[in-house]
Image (tube, rainbow, N blue to C red):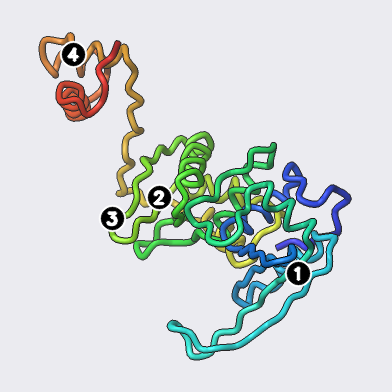
């Protein structure tokens, strides 16, 4: 993570890359609480190994705040040391809330801000807080996000499709009702390179992981999945009008299997018929 100098911009101007990143991270991993008489606080608790990020947040914030550390036992470790950044300012809390950081529980309700913001920095903040970057057990590059928020999941899928061309269908995990969005191989390489650019504000360990993805080379014997077909109304009409699947496949320039699957979906109401 690059050293962060004080920024001569309005606090939480989301067109500024550092604030866009910070807001995305706070939405995913921060907690905004309120009490009587307008009291309250914003807290972010992360592993002490990432304390440098909290110091950057403190430097970016023109209000008094504190960083504390504590060591305790958890379900995963007998001794876990965490660092917590705490901000009390009512003015700052009000602004963050208006931008889209809810008070209290927020996992399903957070959404991309309605104001103009720096897209890739905001997405990187979400990924750093609730995502992963690295290699799968098979040694393939990956970038993933786990979220309960439909607006965040939808936004990520649309954004990444614009960057890499990789389309994803948003679907909750039946076991725990969350979205697990995963990109692998070249798509992950391209996405990581786009999000984690030189000098950006980020978790240093995820920056290092993102940088390492660039060294992966697809093995010569690993087949590439063909690009996803973007079916149009005109293509659907060809499918329905053709006397056989073979005729339709030849006219559209695709293999029989995807044409047969699409025709079945059209005839059984899985996808709407063309007008």
The dot on residue 55 is 1
In whole angstroms, how far apart are the C-alphas of marks 2 and 1? 39 Å
From the image, tell me which residue sits under label 3: 174
Q: Position of residue 66 (x, y in %)?
A: 77, 74
Q: Which residue is mark 4?
A: 240
Residue 169, percent across and down? 36, 40
Q: CA distance from mark 1 to mark 3?
A: 38 Å
Which labelled disc corresponds to residue 159? none
Query: Counting residues from the N terminus, which is met first, the one under dot 4 or under dot 2?
Result: 2
Circle nearer the viewer, 2 or 3: 3
Residue sitting at x 50%, y 49%: 189
Q: Is residue 143 visible?
A: no
Residue 262, given in percent of the width and then of the height, sits at 22, 26
**Quarter the N terminus occupies:** bottom right
- Residue 209 vs 188, above or below: the answer is below
- Residue located at (44% from left, 54% from top): 148
Q: Is residue 55 above or below residue 10?
A: below
Q: Is 129 on the left or on the right of 237, as rendered?
A: right
Residue 113 appears in the figure: yes
Q: Earlier in the sequence, mark 1 or mark 3?
A: 1
Say whether disc 1 or disc 4 marks the residue closer to the N-terminus: 1
């Amino acid at each position: 993570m690059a050293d962060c100098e004080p920024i001569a911009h309005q606090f939480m101007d989301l067109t500024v890359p550092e604030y866009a990143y910070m807001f995305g991270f706070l939405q995913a991993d921060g907690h905004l609480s309120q009490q009587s008489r307008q009291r309250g606080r914003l807290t972010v608790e992360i592993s002490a190994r990432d304390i440098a990020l909290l110091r950057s947040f403190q430097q970016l914030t023109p209000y008094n705040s504190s960083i504390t550390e504590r060591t305790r036992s958890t379900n995963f470790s007998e001794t876990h040391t965490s660092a917590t950044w705490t901000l009390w300012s009512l003015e700052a809390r009000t602004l963050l809330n208006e931008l889209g950081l809810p008070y209290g529980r927020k996992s399903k309700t957070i959404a991309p801000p309605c104001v103009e913001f720096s897209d890739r920095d905001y997405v990187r903040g979400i990924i750093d807080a609730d995502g992963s970057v690295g290699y799968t057990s098979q040694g393939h590059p990956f970038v993933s996000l786990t979220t309960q928020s439909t607006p965040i999941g939808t936004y990520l899928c649309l954004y990444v499709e614009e960057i890499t061309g990789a389309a994803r269908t948003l679907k909750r995990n039946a076991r725990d009702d969350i979205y697990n969005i995963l990109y692998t191989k070249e798509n992950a390489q391209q996405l990581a390179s786009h999000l984690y650019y030189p000098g950006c504000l980020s978790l240093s360990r995820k920056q290092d992981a993102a940088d390492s993805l660039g060294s992966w080379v697809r093995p010569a014997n690993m087949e590439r999945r063909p690009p996803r077909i973007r079916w149009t109304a005109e293509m659907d009409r060809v499918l329905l009008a053709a006397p056989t699947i073979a005729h339709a496949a030849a006219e559209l320039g695709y293999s029989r299997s995807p044409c047969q699957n699409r025709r079945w979906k059209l005839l059984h109401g899985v996808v709407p018929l063309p007008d």
